[in-house]
Amino acid sequence: MRKHFPRIIIGIAVVAIFLGHAVERYRLPLIDNLESIIYDMRLRLTMPGGVDPRIVILDIDEKSLAEKEKGGEGRWPWARDRLALLLDKLFDRYQIAVLGFDVVFAERDESSGIRVLERLGAGELRDVPQFQSVLKQVKPQLEYDDIFARKMKGRPVVLGYIFSSDEPGLAPKKGTLPPPIFTAESFVGRPIRTTTWHGYTANLDVLQKTAISAGHFNSHTDDDGIVRRVPMLAEYSGGYFEPLSLAMVRVLLGSPPVKTISPDASLAPEGYPDLEWLEVGSLRIPVDDTASALVSYRGRKGSFKYYSLVDVINDRIEPAELKGKIVLVGTTAPGLLDLRATPVDSVYPGVEVHANMIAGMLDGSIKQRPPYVLGAEFTLLLVTGLLLALLLPLLNPLRSTLVTILVLVSALVVNVLVFQNGHLVLPIASGVILILTMFTFNTAYGFFVEARGMRQITGLFGQYVPPELVEKMAENPQQFNMAPRAEELSVLFSDVRGFTTISESLTPEDLSVYINDYLTTMSLVIRERHRGTLDKYIGDAIMAFWGAPVADTRHAMDAVLAALDMQNEAKLLNEKFKAKGWPTFKIGIGVNSGVMRVGDMGSKIRKAYTVMGDAVNLGSRLEGITKQYGADIIIGEGTKARISGVVCREVDRVRVKGKDEAVAIYQPLGLEGQVDPAKLNEIELWNQSLRYYRAQQWDQAELQLLNLKKIAPDNGLYDAFIERTAYLRANPPGAGWDGAWKFETK
């Protein structure tokens, strides 16, 4: 025993470090990050799956957004008289139970032209009695907002709105908020912690006053970019507001009040907030120390029945399909940008988050992190750590391995069973890391020889990175692993435009050759020529990133050069396809740089070395909006700031879903010295038009754009800004406008 004494002392010291983390003297980021990953794995492992029959989603999908001659209703937002008709259909024909809008109606509907008529009536036609008489008669039929509000009255309709996290003074305050469910006086003498917001975008006053209820559709995005929680009490200006899901459940139950339940003082640690549950009727909803609830995801996308909204409004759905259902109106259309990264899917419709919350409240399946979890974590670490610290030094490697596996599996099984059956989220990452740390410390690991390291590195990363990088990694295999971490990287997304049409024109055999040639060509550009990491193929789409697993200080430059080369290779490949009589193609590419989560992520069944986070999501969205600007490549401002020697045209400033601040986007045109001087002159003219545009000098901007259109008739960027300038002239953004364009109405 004496010879093992130093190892036992060091083992106990390691346990003490973990105990400090458990009592929150300090936090170990690795443990916190792993905790999130293990939580996601437990969630995926225990999800009930299947389709919940109680909740239906009416999808503002691509079919609904199609032009009317193609069976759709056109771009969103739709005229409110059509939404008024939708309300009649849902409550009279389909007899639904409750309706929630995962959209906000913050702007007045001017599609009827009533504002133009009013201006004429107050101006040059003011003294024309016939006009005034007709205007008075038709005005009620053209006030679509009032019509929509009247159809809402007395019906179980819950509106949605969103709070802004902008700094005070910068956050918008648009529309009318509903009354809060609690005021500051409700918690006098009861310390609680909530998320505080400084602004909001809410619904028109006439709609808010008529609706029976409203709830926010904010969610918590964790540091890794994943949505796991929803704030059940969002604090704004001394009031506490409920989410859309809770508002809908309350309306469904007859609008009972929300009650608060405090934790057991004997179990709660000192300083813990005085709130553990929200009670609505017979339902209890557990909340954490920030008054947020964990989203009880039922499964991957499609856990709820979807119907195209245009099919409902046009009576293409049988009434029995919706009768008595809880109905949410939301969108899965990529162009409306309501897609989130969640534990169950990296691209997940935001409307399904609300549906999962509703199902979780009704089922009582929302997971709970009670205040005593800190004590449970401390006890687990103390008992397990001391057991291993005293026992492992006495065992040979084989027995040490068996004991470690037994302890680890036992801890995981108990944790998963408690998670699944007791709906308790008990910490496990610290225990797992402690067990593995003690095992590693007490076990000889000299068998990690160079050859083994080479095989391991090749097996892990060979499919992602070129051979020369694998060889470099094998020189120091201990430096490389697939454990998730945060790194500054660059990500690239590419997609073939109109690939469905292309695939329909080819035989299966030709299509296989076509897509294989395309993916092989582009992959060689990324992987071999520019040393990128191939992440995945999604049909014809490619995702790649730079900067991991091998550090690359030029990751942004390499990504942009790869994008330019991909466009050049596309031209050569099109010549080859054209010679075979095959259709040609165009690709859109989005590139963004920033801090991302990179590592081995997925399920027990399948994992992949990939990247996640806000910067990744933005890169995907940049690819998606290339066609909006007629651009082959669009890069984010983070990428632009990290490159040099590339001629870039500033395209726009945009706000995308999930980002409150505007981001500048650019179009790389080629390397300096290789871009035609005429194109450089064209860029100067474009920059001038952009300055006019942002200064709200619409006439000058339009004139400059029309001149540019003569220079480059086929440039879709100029078409887009000509149309937008006309729109903004008619709908001025007002003073303080930062020139940013928002692509989705949420």
Image: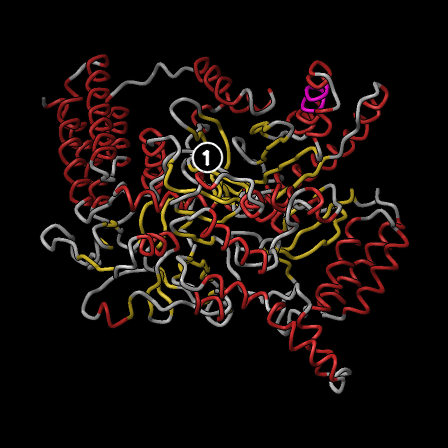
Q: Is residue 419 left or right of residue 721?
A: left
Q: Main secondary structure of the magenta part?
A: helix
Q: Residue at x 39, y 63 (%)?
A: 212
Q: Position of residue 461 (x, y in %)?
A: 52, 23
Q: Secondary structure at mark 1?
A: loop
Q: Residue at x 66, y 44 (%)?
A: 66
Q: Position of residue 47 (x, y in %)?
A: 34, 32
Q: Is residue 162 above or below residue 601?
A: below
Nearer-the-camera pick, 60 or 227: 60
Magenta residues? 514-520
Q: Position of residue 482 (x, y in %)?
A: 44, 28
Which residue carries the number 1 mark?
302
Q: Residue at x 88, y 46 (%)?
A: 676
Q: Is residue 615 visible?
A: no
Q: Is residue 209 left or right of residue 370?
A: right
Kindly indicate the quadrant of the structure image that contains residue 553. Answer: top right
Residue 77 part of the magenta segment: no
Nearer-the-camera pick, 419 or 474: 419
Q: Residue at x 38, y 62 (%)?
A: 213
